[in-house]
Image (tube, helix red, strand yellow):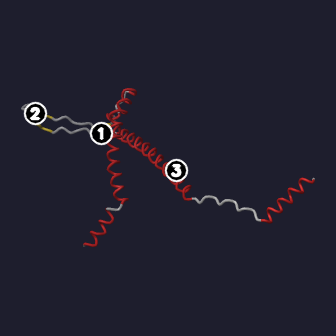
């Protein structure tokens, strides 16, 4: 049993697991912020511009029934709520998702660019400097002088 606990500690305290946990917590908070932006800022604007409040959009599948009372006020039959298909809430959730997806796209794109820049800098720093050209040998110097003399005579 102690071995399993030690293995779990090693797993849970790895950097990737802790980073993932922090990401999930921040992602949840970010999701709440985006939901508030959509519900409290964007959707009211759409309601004013388009004249439709998406959260109220629904299709009544089965109408509700009011309670029936007798002359003394006692309930004879209970009220039944209407059965509705609330597609307006679905539209709002789709908009939430799209905004979160767009934000994450730009965040991941920025992180990718930064990491590629860092990788290029590391590669440039790790790359060996080009070796200087070797000095010409005595034979090469002599041949160069002969060539230059022959050019002068022509």
- Please identify the quarter of the rendering in which residue 147 is found: bottom right
Q: Tell me the residue at 18%/38% (across/down).
A: 79
Q: Residue at x 21, y 36 (%)?
A: 65
**Of the image marks 1 and 3, the number of the one nearer the N terminus:** 1
Of circles 2 and 1, the one toward us is 1
Query: Do callouts 2 and 3 mark residues in contact (Cβ within 8 Å)?
Result: no
Callout 3: SS: helix
Mark number, residue 117: 3
List the single residue furthest toward the left.
Answer: 72
Tag 1 secondary structure: strand
Dot 1, crowdedness within 10 Å: few (<14), some or many (≥20)? some
- Residue 29 higher or lower than 8, as above or below: above
Judging depth in this view, the residue of 93 and 19 nearest the camera is: 19
Residue under the point 86% across and 56% down? 148
- Quadrant including the N terminus: bottom left
Question: With 133 as the anchor, is 65 left or right in this view?
Answer: left
Residue 108 to residue 53: above or below: below
Question: Badge 3: few (under 14), some or many (20 or more) residues near its Cα, within 10 Å?
Answer: few
User: Which residue position holds label 1?
Assistant: 84
Task: Give the Cα separation between the discs numbered 2 and 3.
Answer: 79 Å
Q: Position of residue 109 (x, y in %)?
A: 48, 47
Numbered label attached to residue 121: none
Q: Residue at x 70, y 62 (%)?
A: 134
Instruction: Give the labeled residue for mark 2.
Output: 70
Occupied quadrant, residue 42: top left
* Residue 119 vs residue 46, the one in the foreground: 119
Closest to the camera, between mark 1 and mark 3, is 3
* Count of marks overlaid on the render: 3
> Which of disc 3 and disc 2 is earlier in sequence?
2
- Image position, residue 117 (x, y; %): 52, 50
Of the image marks 2 and 1, the number of the one nearer the N terminus: 2
């Amino acid at each position: 049993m102690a071995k399993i606990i030690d293995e779990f500690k090693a797993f849970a305290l790895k950097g990737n697991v802790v980073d993932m946990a922090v990401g999930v917590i921040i992602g949840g908070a970010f999701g709440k912020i985006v939901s508030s932006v959509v519900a409290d800022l964007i959707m009211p604007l759409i309601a004013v511009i388009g004249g439709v409040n998406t959260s109220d959009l629904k299709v009544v599948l089965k109408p509700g029934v009011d309670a029936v009372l007798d002359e003394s006020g006692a309930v004879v039959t209970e009220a039944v709520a209407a059965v509705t298909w609330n597609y307006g809430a679905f539209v709002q959730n789709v908009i939430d998702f799209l905004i979160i997806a767009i934000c994450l796209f730009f965040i991941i794109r920025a992180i990718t660019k930064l990491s590629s820049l860092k990788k290029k800098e590391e590669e440039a720093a790790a790359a060996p400097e080009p070796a200087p050209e070797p000095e010409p040998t005595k034979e090469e110097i002599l041949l160069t002088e002969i060539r230059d003399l022959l050019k002068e005579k022509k």
